[in-house]
Amino acid sequence: MDILKIFEDKYILAAVKPSGIAAQGDKTGDEDLMTILGGQLFLVHRLDRPVGGVILYAKTQTAASRLSRQIAEKTIQKEYLAIVTGTPAAPEGELIDNLKKLRTVNMSKVVPPETPGSKEARLTYRLMETVQTEDLGSLSLLSIKLHTGRHHQIRVQLSNAGIPIWGDTKYNRIFMKRKGWSKIALWSNKLSFKHPDDNRLIELNSIPPYEEPWSIFNSLGDREVCL
């Protein structure tokens, strides 16, 4: 499998993760991105298996530790593109919920703030474009800034807001019966952070491949390859 590397030096490696492949080895034993890239790597931030886009690995323990500190201090900026079924209530806004992970089913749910084991989740979104389709009605393209990093956060919060992600078999009722589905319309398209060695600002970008459903939105432009 050909993987596009978008930044690499002796400290870090950033690549475009294809949808449907695990970021690192798991209990399935399926081929994973870390193994494909080779070498001793440390995963800095996670992307769910169905999600594609920019992903960052560290090449040394020191680099991993410094980047992990940036994540803890919320100085790493993460932005996503998402296609949802429906239209958001407002063209831009903030979603704040408390989430609790359901480990037995590998899902999370929105719960009252006082729920033991729950954590606050926060994101902001901006509506980029809405199109009408024959089979699913309105589909909306959102730009999302993630301010916390909870399990399945974007997927859960958008579903709870009544605009679940296209293709999501866990949180979108339209797709729950589609067995074997492995892609969802959620893409890690921007990542900015300070380089773990010299603190210079690094900004990485990627846009989804020109394929359904991304290809129906004019605001993403005409694309033939994943950049």
Image (cartoon, rainbow, N blue to C red):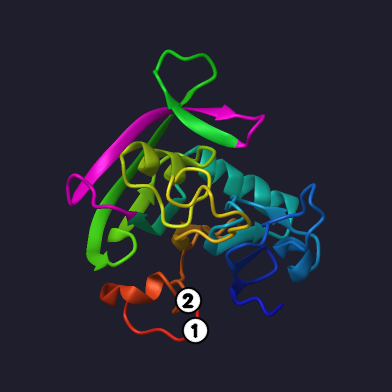
Q: Is residue 126 left or right of residue 189?
A: left
What percent of the width, then of the height, locates residue 171?
47, 43
Which residue is nearer to you in this view: 224 or 175?
175
Residue at far left of view: 90
Position above or below: 27 against 17: above
What percent of the width, then of the height, locates residue 38?
79, 68
Q: Say which amino acid is labelled 1.
A: Val
**Cα distance between the residues tagged 1 and 2:** 5 Å
The segment highlighted magenta reads 85-106
Give the total number of marks visible in the rendering. 2
Which residue corresponds to mark 2? 209
Which residue is nearer to you in this view: 159 or 7?
159
Residue 74, quarter of picture: top left
Residue 120, quarter of picture: top left
Under circle 1, the secondary element is loop
Image quarter hosting the N terminus: bottom right
Q: Earlier in the sequence, mark 1 or mark 2?
A: 2
What percent of the width, then of the height, locates residue 199?
51, 57
Which residue corresponds to mark 1? 225
Residue at 50% across, 22% down: 118
Residue at 54% across, 19% down: 117
Q: Is residue 104 left or right of residue 168?
A: right
Q: Which mark is residue 154?
A: none
Q: Does residue 28 appear anywhere in the picture?
A: yes
Residue at 77% across, 49% down: 26
Q: Is residue 124 left or right of residue 195?
A: left
Q: Does residue 74 appear anywhere in the picture?
A: no
Residue at 49% across, 58% down: 184
What percent of the width, then of the height, locates residue 39?
81, 66
